[in-house]
Amino acid sequence: DHALQEELLEVGYVSVPLLDPDELAAFRAEVEAMEPDDGFAPTGEGPFNYSTYHCTFLDTNAAYKRQANEAIRRVFQPHIDRYVVDYRILTSNLYVKPPGRGRFQIHQNWPTLEDLSITTLTVWCPLQHCTAENATLHMVPGSHKLTPDVATPAEPPFFSSFEDELVEQYLVPVEVEAGHALIFDDSLVHWSPDNQGDAPRWAVQIETLPVEAEPVLYHLDTTGSEARWELFSVDFDFYVDRSIAEVIGRPTELTSLGHRPNRNRQMTVEDFAGLLAEGPTIRQEVYRTGSWTPTTVLGS
């Protein structure tokens, strides 16, 4: 759909219908019967998982992780193919926010390709009507592909000094019907607050890549005089088979693809506002050349 593609390129996200009511009810019944170790209600007291929301990837039950990923792929792949053409699923998760908790930090999704100019897409589908009250996603429209920042747990995000301003001035709640989906560029700045509703908030999150792309893992190597990114080749079962502890540390059994410069830079809110205003021009150049000009790599 040309109109959807133009909206995605300009704003960074689109909303589309995905599951019909019968499909939605059957899928929800299937996943609610699953048994993750955290019971879909983590306490935030684990050694690596400090979250008060459930995420399939963060759970310690490997059999459950495989079961959830199989169900999501089986139900969602045919529908995703209608909108995300020539993309395939890398990983998928159930996200469950119990009432009164579940705040997710402001973030960009982790990059999964060496070439940051290539668009990877997340499909986010709530299993009930989502509003600001029950923690729908909040987006910064047009915040995608502003800078070649690599978002990982190893580095504070480029916006770490002005997160309050992002919440107060830039992050917009996007209301989504049950079974509809937000499809968004993984470099888009987004967030979701605590669930202030009376019931758990369920959603499916699916990471997709172009069919010909090969996924990588970024690891920040701080052993030299300057920190650099070391890239590793991963397969499409990597995030199902590994724990968060294995992903955060330097992998010893994966093939290293060598090192790349670390171009991450901290910004001020004024820097961000300037890049946001120039976003259409920046993205046009990135899509055309596959690179960012020096003026969009702050501090270079």
Image (cartoon, rainbow, N blue to C red):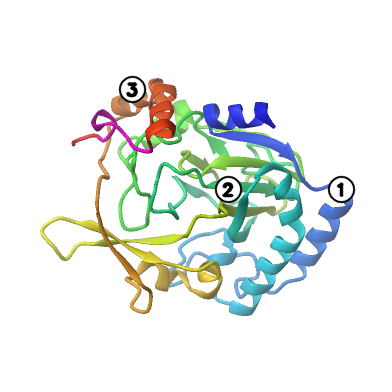
For marks 2 and 3, the one nearer the N-term is 2
Q: Are marks 1 and 2 in contact (CB under 8 Å)?
A: no
The residue under the point 85% across, 54% down is: 23
Let me know if residue 167 appears in the view: yes
Q: Is residue 193 left or right of residue 23?
A: left
Tag 2: residue type? Thr
Numbered circle sitting on residue 266: none
Q: How many marks?
A: 3
- Count residues near mark 1 (Cα–Cα under 10 Å), then give few for <14, some for 14-19, many for 20+: few
The residue under the point 50% across, 50% down is: 104
For marks 1 and 2, the one nearer the N-term is 1
Reply above or below: 77 against 64: above
Q: Which residue is mark 1?
A: 21
The residue under the point 42% across, 31% down is: 288
Residue 222 location (% of width, % of height): 19, 62
Residue 131 location (% of width, % of height): 67, 37
Numbered circle sitting on residue 274: 3
Tag 3: residue type? Gly
